[in-house]
Amino acid sequence: MNKPSNLLKGLIFFIILIFSSCYPIEPEFVSDFDSVFTEKSDPDFDFGNPAIRTYYLADTVMVLTDPGVSDTNLEVDLDLVLNRVRTNMDQAGYTEISDRNLATQADYLVLVSVNRSDNYFNTWWGGWGGWGGWGGWGWGGCCFFPPVVTTSNIRTGSIIVELLDGKTLSQRNQTIPEVWYGVGSGLFQGNNANLNNRTLRAIDQMFIQSPYLKR
């Protein structure tokens, strides 16, 4: 049997390419847009220092959302968020200092914040449809004038966890340097249960991506 020629191979590849382009791989679920980013804020900080053993977790989640953001019935359970951060810190080998009066003795001060944003964009379709020009659907004169403009809003949300170097806090009103942070972001859509589950998974992923935090 003769081997396929280069021309035949090229033709087969071209046909596969054309048909595969008809079935693009696109995100199917809201969670497909979720992402987690972590970074060492201070590259010189010694995360492996065995003396770092304790943490104080602020008991309030800071809400950074602009008051002008559109209303939604979706909410993040902030108690679940704090408990998941606490669980990950405990599992990483740290001991929590829960007494606020002893917070300055902790090696890490842990801050948690959430944010939600509106992202507006405009799209238009229709317009003049002369022969050989853009007419909306199809080729040639088929449509109308003036064009129709629609405005859409994509809601996004973020969960932010920060570790501050508690040992540098020697007096009140002093700036505490951040040594690590993690950000989980995605679409603020779905239902409350879905939103909470995705937020908690993002917190877990922050610590998975930062194995140097483990004792």
Image (tube, rainbow, N blue to C red):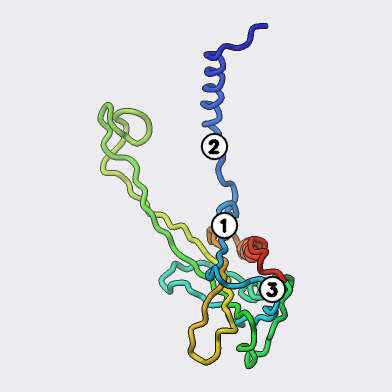
Among numbered discs 1 and 3, the one appearing first in the sequence? 1
Q: Which amino acid type corresponds to the residue marked 1 in the rendered image?
A: Ser
| Amino acid type at mark 3 | Met
Does residue 96 appear left or right of residue 4 in this picture? right
Q: Is residue 30 left or right of residue 173?
A: right
Residue carrying label 2: 24
Residue 15 sits in which quadrant?
top right
Residue, disc 3:
89
| Along the line of sight, the residue nearer the viewer: 160 or 65 | 160
- The residue depicted at 59 percent of the width and 50 percent of the height is 29
Q: CA distance from mark 2 to mark 1?
A: 21 Å
**N-terminal label among 2 and 1:** 2
* Image location of residue 53, percent across then percent down: 70, 79
Q: Secondary structure at mark 2?
A: loop
Q: Nearer the viewer, mark 1 or mark 3?
A: 3
Q: CA distance from mark 1 to mark 3?
A: 21 Å
- Residue 56: image x %, image y %? 64, 82
Q: Position of residue 66 (x, y in %)?
A: 43, 72
Name the N-terminal-most of marks 3 and 2: 2
Q: Position of residue 209 (x, y in %)?
A: 64, 61
Spatial CA span between label 3 and label 2: 41 Å
Report if the CB atoms under discs 1 and 3 are less than 8 Å apart.
no
Is disc 3 placed on a helix, strand or loop?
helix
Q: Residue at x 55, y 22 (%)?
A: 13
- Reading the image, the residue beneath label 1 is 35
**Residue 74 visible in rendering:** no
Residue drawn at x 64%, y 88% is 105
Label 1, secondary structure: give it. Answer: strand
Look at the image and tell me whether residue 38 can be seen.
yes
**Where is residue 136, by image quadrant?**
top left
| Dot in front, 2 or 1 | 1
Decide: few, some or many residues near mark 2? Use Cα within 10 Å; few <14, some 14-19, many ≥20: few
